[in-house]
Amino acid sequence: MTDRGYHSIGEVLALLLEEFPDVTISKIRFLESQGLIQPERTPSGYRKFTESEVERLRYILREQRQNFLPLRIIKNRLDDSGEIMDDSTDVSRDMDMPADMPTTGHPAARATVPRVPTGRIPRPDRDITPAAAAKAARREASRHAENTESIPRDELIKRTSIDPALLRDLEKTGFVGGHEVGDTTFFDAHSFEIARTAARFRDMGIDVRHLRGWKSSSERELTLFEQRILPLLRQRNPAAREEALAMLAEFIELGADLRSALLMREVSRLTEQR
């Protein structure tokens, strides 16, 4: 714990990266948007993470990685007070297990589970009709949504209140990118955060074309960070990787702090009494 009694989001990222190399600030924000964590805020709006919030994040990420649980099930395993429930809690009754997921127990039991190629449903003695194919595609998309953090297009639109035309503009300009499963387009946590922010900007009169400066700036920023961390990553040893990830987390936080300070300086000039 820091001297001030809490961690910033950048510090939390640095604490998690060693155990969860794929975690990002966007991922942490996404988990917050889904109600799995509830960090407090400083008067200036920055997130404050206590040690219990960090441990809660570790628990969520472990459950996803080790048990492949969807977020709604993980949320059910966390009690209302925010404490982690006993790992012995039986959640199987809350889940619809895919037919191709291995069962637990003796290897012989696992061997009896039939495996069906993704996207295909065996229908002996009759052809697959268009309606049946569409139903299979919807089933595949539903299973994908249950077992990943991906968000289907309709759900993203509902949660972010984004106009569908604006979402299409964000796709065309490279702000967000989806992937197809069955007949449904899914978006990741980064796209969710970007879409929600873009929707708020649109509500306040700022369109996609005005946001391109942020996109270009973030790409240039990443290029600068890469120059510092890639030599460490190329060493291919755990210590160097840990140093690189910690450095990247600090760069991200410093970049955010610098942008905020520069913007507030300009805002103060704008709002000064003439």
Image: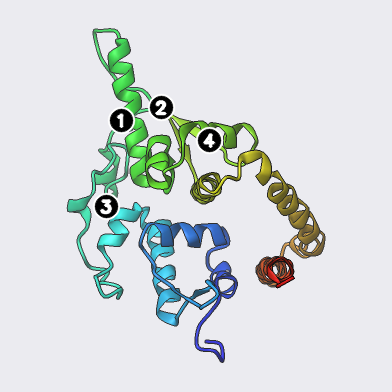
Circle 2 SS class = loop
Sequence-wise first label, 2 or 4: 4
Nearest the eye: 161 or 130: 161
Determine the residue positioned at 46% across, 33% down.
Answer: 164
Residue that numbered label 2 is attached to: 182
Q: Are marks 2 and 4 in contact (CB under 8 Å)?
A: no
Nearest the eye: 253 or 58: 253
- Of badges 3 and 1, the one in the foreground is 1
User: Is 254 above or below relative to 91?
Assistant: below
Q: Are marks 3 and 1 in contact (CB under 8 Å)?
A: no
Q: Which quadrant of the figure contains the C terminus?
A: bottom right
- Of badges 1 and 4, the one in the foreground is 4
Sequence-wise first label, 1 or 4: 1
Residue 268 numbered mark, or none: none
Q: What kind of residue is marked 4?
A: Leu
Q: How far apart are marks 3 and 4 (CA)?
A: 45 Å
Q: What kind of residue is marked 2?
A: Gly
Nearest the eye: 273 or 233: 273
Sequence-wise first label, 3 or 4: 3
User: Is 44 above or below relative to 177?
Assistant: below
Q: Distance between the residues labelled 3 and 1?
A: 24 Å
Circle 3 SS class = loop
Label 1, residues with CA under 10 Å away: few <14, some 14-19, many ≥20: some
Circle 1 SS class = helix
Determine the residue positioned at 43% across, 36% down.
Answer: 153
Residue 166 numbered mark, or none: 4
Does residue 238 appear in the picture of this structure? no
